[in-house]
Amino acid sequence: MIGKRAAALILAGTFGLTACADSLGPEGNASQEDREEILSLLDESGFFADEFGIDGVYDGGQDPGLMLAPAEEQAEVTAPRVWGRRRGLPVRRLVTVDVDAQAGTALVSKEVFFEGKFLADITQDEQMNPTEKPLEEKLVQYATFRRVPVEAADSQGRRWRLVEISAAEWVMTVDSLRTVAITKVTVSVNGVLQLEITDPSEMLDVEGRIPTLNPEDEVTVRAWVENGLDNGNEPDTFVFLHLFHATPISRAWIRLPMERVVTDIETYYQLTWHARHTGRARIAVDVIDAQTFTTETEDDYRANIWGVPYRIVPVEEAS
């Protein structure tokens, strides 16, 4: 487990500026050959993309075959159906690959900065006319590789193996604007808890801890969140789930609101969905301050997103 403090130390040593390519700053001590092989394997893994969900506005009306969370009876603020993000190309993308030759391991750290727009149509008319407000946030994620013997190389002769991956976290670039936060996410499959995360930088064993699903499995995601602002909104926070393998028709990103559950001892957000197709992606828990949806152009976008990796495999491949 890297942990937030160690992660901060790693990223403190990397800097650079680029339009959309890899960092022009320090790239770590890996050889060019090792770096290219490792980054290629990460691209193929399905767990290390810079984005999640649909780019641009999205009509969050009910998708076929899926149940939306019910609106709260006492809600004073409601999230519009039409909203989304347009991050654009990264203004800075830092990818560091550090190899420990003696241990035969490599640590990859990624930090990607975006300056885009948050789009929302909060009007109550029948026209789709979203307005925009500033969006400045960054993505942080880590991965660990292990080098295997020559005889264990893959069909392309590659000897690095992805063994650990962290969740991806999108946060506000400016520290003082990080007023909403996810504190815990759990993933249960067919009623059995498979994963609990309280630190998005925690390393997850690829074979042992990443949730492995089969088509038609029932998946329940729960999220615990905090909001440090008091704008008098009810509710003060909205939580959504972005899914890629949840529609019966095709593999495509959808976004669903999570239901707020209030018990005698805690409040959390929950959504249950069914795996429909095989593949690899992330379950993205998306927390947004309700104030974001009360103004058209104010600079009040506040959010925190955790992208939790998972795989869906045919039943015969599960073990």
Image (cartoon, rainbow, N blue to C red):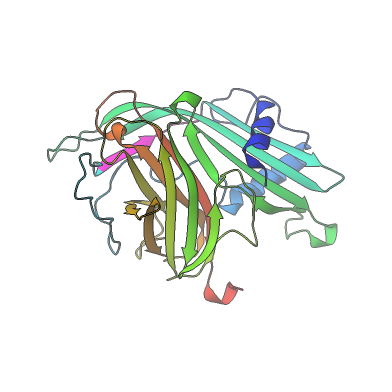
Visible in this render: residue 70?
yes
Which quarter of the figure has residue 288? top left
Visible in this render: residue 174?
no
Please name the residue shown 73% across and 60% down the image. Answer: 155
* 43 lies left or right of 288: right
Outermost front residue: 264
Q: Is residue 232 above or below residue 287?
A: above
Outermost right residue: 102
Residue 88 inside the magenta-drawn segment: yes
Q: Is residue 103 above or below residue 96?
A: below
Q: What stretch is highlighted in magenta?
A: 82-90
* 193 lies left or right of 80: right
Residue 75 inside the magenta-drawn segment: no
The one nearer the camera, 282 or 43, is 282
Position of the C terminus by quadrant? bottom right
Give the image location of residue 72, x and y in percent: 23, 50
Please name the residue shown 41% across and 44% down the image. Answer: 286
Q: In this view, does 122 lie above or below 115?
A: below
Q: Is residue 14 above or below residue 264?
A: above
